[in-house]
Image (cartoon, grey):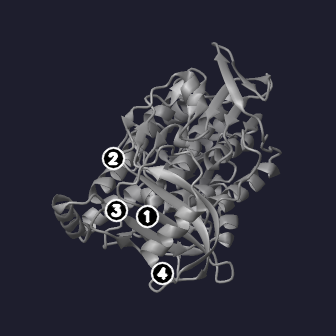
Amino acid sequence: MDADVIVVGAGPTGLTLAHELALAGVDVALLDKGPGRTGESRALNLHPRTAEILAMRGMLDGAEEQARARLETTHFAHLPVPLALDGWNSRYPYQVAIPQAEVEQVLEEHLAGLGVRVRWNVEVTDIEQDAERIRVQAGGTWVEARYLAGCDGGRSFVRKQLGIAFPGLEARWFGTVSDVVLGVAGEGIATTWDTKGSPRMRPDGSFANIFPIGNESDRVHRIFYSVADQVIDDQRAKVPDTEVVAAIEEFYGSETEVKEVRWASRFSDASRLAEHYRAGRAFLAGDAAHIHLPLGGQGLNTGIQDAMNLGWKLAADVAGWAPEGLLDTYHGERHPVGAAVLTNTRAQVALGQKGVEHDALREIFTQLLALPEANRLLGGAISGLSIRYDLGGDEPVGSRLADMVLPDGRWAGDLFHQGHGVLLTALPDLVAEAAPWTGRVDAVAVRELPGLSAEAVLVRPDGHICWVPGTPLADALHRWFGAPRP
């Protein structure tokens, strides 16, 4: 074997997955067909659950240091009532406003610290697999591994080559996103990075929004716009700079001076979900598994969370201790999450349509968002904080472990830096019971578990609770962490 796992695509999803694998000692080959980092900002935020995940591996500090802002709310279809992000016992009850390019930089630096570097200019052109191995033709040579992960975006070659169906809705309208440098900002253009920006809506359905994403010195702004009845023949074709400048002047006045168009690309309301997240020895994660309108900034965040769920399970199989069926739980747990993201983005598309009926729908929805229960429901979904897996038990089993300050002053989330499972217990006998799983599970004795009614919790490496007292601890250890060491 040339590697244990081949990861195709070095965006945030692929980088996170490669880090999870390397942290567990897995030999990983991270391939990308591009020539290197583009520097394009792309996605702009880390939601609270993603911030928790990165903090669990000690990778959030670098992102927070580079963050442009902390956004204490998010939105649903840009309706006027914001979605609250507090009330979930999170250490990060806010969005970390940071361009994707800088998130990738932080992830890549941590990955390099584990001895793994991206192999750029390596395009995968063929895939073969059997019961024992998987091979990819990459850069003109064959690379062999035990497993393959396709993290290669919405047009995923891996997904297509595997023959995995990608059903969903075709694009019905297109928009454009661009980063520009403004010399003079027209009246009414937002001066701070927030979730509202400077929206402009027109009766024909055309819209635009612009807001600063840089600092006062570089004056970089992000603009989204969609012009009604604009025909896009080729979504992949380069967006003319002149079109971006004309759109800014049209929506924000001719006095707005555009000094530079850094990059621009099209997006659409197409939404698709891979029928399966696994095909034999190959897996899909991130945009390769699900695409949708980038409302709420959920794409990057869902991809990183996919990677966190898959990574420890693949590493367990490579290490030889994965219990039977563990790898299949990846599809079982993450496919419903992808489906839920498509549902909420499709709902937001419907709320953004023109017409009297849609105006009425927005009015009713705005009233609903003012209700605490409805606001919490959607805030939890967009932020990822409410995600719960069906792990075969009553609450809190399946839910994320809410970060808490332990009696010794440590944050519970900081116990996961090594990528192990964690047993937090106020019952000393359980520490001894978990000893045969040392190296997979770190048993931590505490006086109490603040905020939890249970006296002990077993938590998987991805931060989700998989056991509380009521059933034998050994059963849960066997189910999630395999047979004990001899």
Q: Amino acid at mark 3?
A: Ala
Q: Which of marks 4 and 3 precedes in the sequence?
A: 3
* Helix, strand or loop at mark 4: loop
Upstream in sequence: badge 3 or badge 1: 3
Q: CA distance from mark 3 to mark 4?
A: 20 Å
Q: Residues within 10 Å of mark 1 (few under 14, many from 20)?
A: few
Q: Is residue 218 above or below residue 87?
A: below
Residue under pointer 1: 451
Q: Residue at x 56, y 23 (%)?
A: 162
When the figure is inspected, residue 451 is found, relative to residue 194, above or below; the finding is above
Q: Nearer the viewer, mark 4 or mark 2?
A: 4
Q: Residue at x 70, y 46 (%)?
A: 19
Kind of residue at badge 2:
Thr
Residue 101 occupies which quadrant of the picture? bottom right
Q: Which residue lies most toward the top here? A: 131
- The residue closer to the viewer here, 125 or 297, is 125
* Residue at image mark 2: 343
**Depicted 344 relative to depicted 361: above or below:** above
Name the residue at 63% across, 53% down. 416
* Kind of element beneath mark 2: helix
Labelled disc at residue 77: 3
Residue behind mark 4: 189
Give the CA separation, mark 2 to mark 1.
32 Å
Which of the two discs, 3 and 1, sits closer to the camera? 3
- Label 3 CA crowd tier, 10 Å (few <14, some 14–19, many 20+): many
Q: Do the CB atoms of the residues marked 3 and 4 lie less than 8 Å apart?
A: no
Instruction: Tell me where residue 103 appears, x and y as whole percent.
Output: 65, 59
Q: Is residue 97 above or below residue 300?
A: below
The quadrant of the picture occupied by the N terminus is: top right
